[in-house]
Image (cartoon, rainbow, N blue to C red):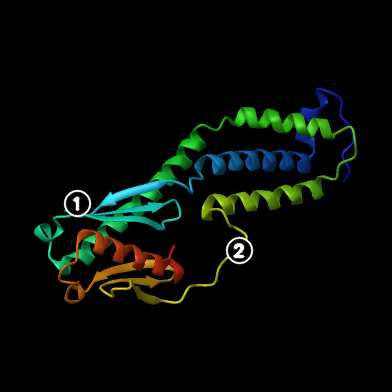
């Protein structure tokens, strides 16, 4: 059905009378709202830091949950045993990821709360009215807007690359060059972090352990971990 021009105030009655036009208006408003929320909540460059309960190990991840830094307290051997290092690394990593996820959720909630739908509706109405002097096929425009709406929903839900859905990553266990820090990857995610105390060099410093852990996390990322 082709929409004909409705002058001025007749637009509102046209929206009520024309189901396709009303649906087009609704989708347009939702699309604008989702775009605003996705833009406000997207923080891929963010950094989220957390430590294990003993505050011996600190891990920093980004908005995509990739490890960006690992630090180990110089007095780590006085606080925990070598066998407990794996638990500390896993706890710090998990806490950092939780902080990243919580921050993203809070940003989305804040963006939704700050969305003024009345303003969006007025913007959409102005655009639709501007289109009305020329013939418009609402079905075609509705299809395009629905496609954009779906893309924005995927962006909001999954991040910067909604179009490509990667195949499930195989499970793997990777380690750093020293072989004493290993990361277990399952379904593309870090599932466990382990430290083989018997392989820790006798003269290992906190820097040595941090570098080994970073290398193991990088290997996990290459193996498919988020």
Q: Position of residue 143 (x, y in %)?
A: 75, 51
Label 1 crowd (10 A; few <14 / some 14-19 / many >=20): some
Q: Residue furthest left?
A: 78
Which quadrant is home to the C terminus?
Answer: bottom left
Q: Is residue 171 above or below residue 209?
A: below
Q: Quadrant of residue 192?
A: bottom left
On the picture, is 87 further left or further right than 221?
Answer: left
Give the SS element for disc 1. loop
- What residue appears at the point 70 percent right and 30 percent down from the top-left corner? 123
- What residue appears at the point 69 percent right and 28 percent down from the top-left corner? 122
The residue carrying mark 2 is 164
Q: Position of residue 225 (x, y in %)?
A: 43, 66
Name the one closer to the observer, 59 or 155.
59
- What residue appears at the point 81 percent right and 45 percent down from the top-left corner? 138
Q: Position of residue 15 (x, y in %)?
A: 77, 34
Q: What is the CA distance from the residue labelled 2 to the residue labelled 1? A: 39 Å
On the picture, is 82 further left or further right than 219?
Answer: left
On the picture, is 164 further left or further right than 56?
Answer: right
Q: Residue furthest top?
A: 9
Residue 66 in view in this figure: yes
Disc tally is 2
Q: Are marks 2 and 1 in contact (CB under 8 Å)?
A: no
Give the SS element for disc 2. loop
Label 2 crowd (10 A; few <14 / some 14-19 / many >=20): few
The tag on residue 55 is 1
Q: Position of residue 90 (x, y in %)?
A: 27, 62
Q: Is residue 200 above or below residue 124?
A: below
Residue 224 in view in this figure: no
On the picture, is 85 further left or further right than 223?
Answer: left
Name the one closer to the observer, 125 or 92.
92
């Amino acid at each position: 059905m082709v929409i004909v021009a409705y002058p001025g105030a007749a637009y509102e009655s046209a929206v009520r009378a024309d189901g396709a036009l009303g649906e087009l208006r609704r989708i347009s408003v939702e699309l604008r709202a989702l775009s605003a929320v996705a833009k406000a909540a997207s923080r891929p460059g963010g950094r989220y830091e957390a430590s294990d309960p003993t505050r011996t190990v600190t891990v920093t991840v980004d908005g995509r949950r990739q490890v960006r830094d690992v630090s180990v307290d110089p007095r780590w051997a006085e606080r925990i045993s070598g066998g407990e290092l794996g638990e500390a690394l896993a706890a710090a990593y998990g806490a950092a990821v939780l902080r990243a996820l919580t921050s993203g959720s809070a940003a989305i909630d804040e963006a939704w709360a700050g969305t003024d739908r009345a303003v969006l509706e007025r913007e959409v109405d102005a655009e639709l009215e501007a289109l009305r002097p020329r013939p418009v096929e609402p079905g075609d425009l509705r299809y395009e807007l629905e496609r954009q709406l779906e893309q924005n929903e995927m962006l909001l839900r999954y991040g910067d690359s909604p179009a490509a859905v990667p195949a499930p990553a195989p499970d793997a266990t990777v380690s750093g060059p020293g072989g004493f820090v290993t990361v277990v990857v399952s379904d593309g995610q870090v599932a466990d972090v382990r430290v083989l105390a018997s392989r820790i060099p006798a003269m290992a410093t906190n820097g040595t352990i941090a570098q080994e852990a970073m290398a193991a996390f990088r290997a996990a990322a290459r193996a498919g971990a988020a």
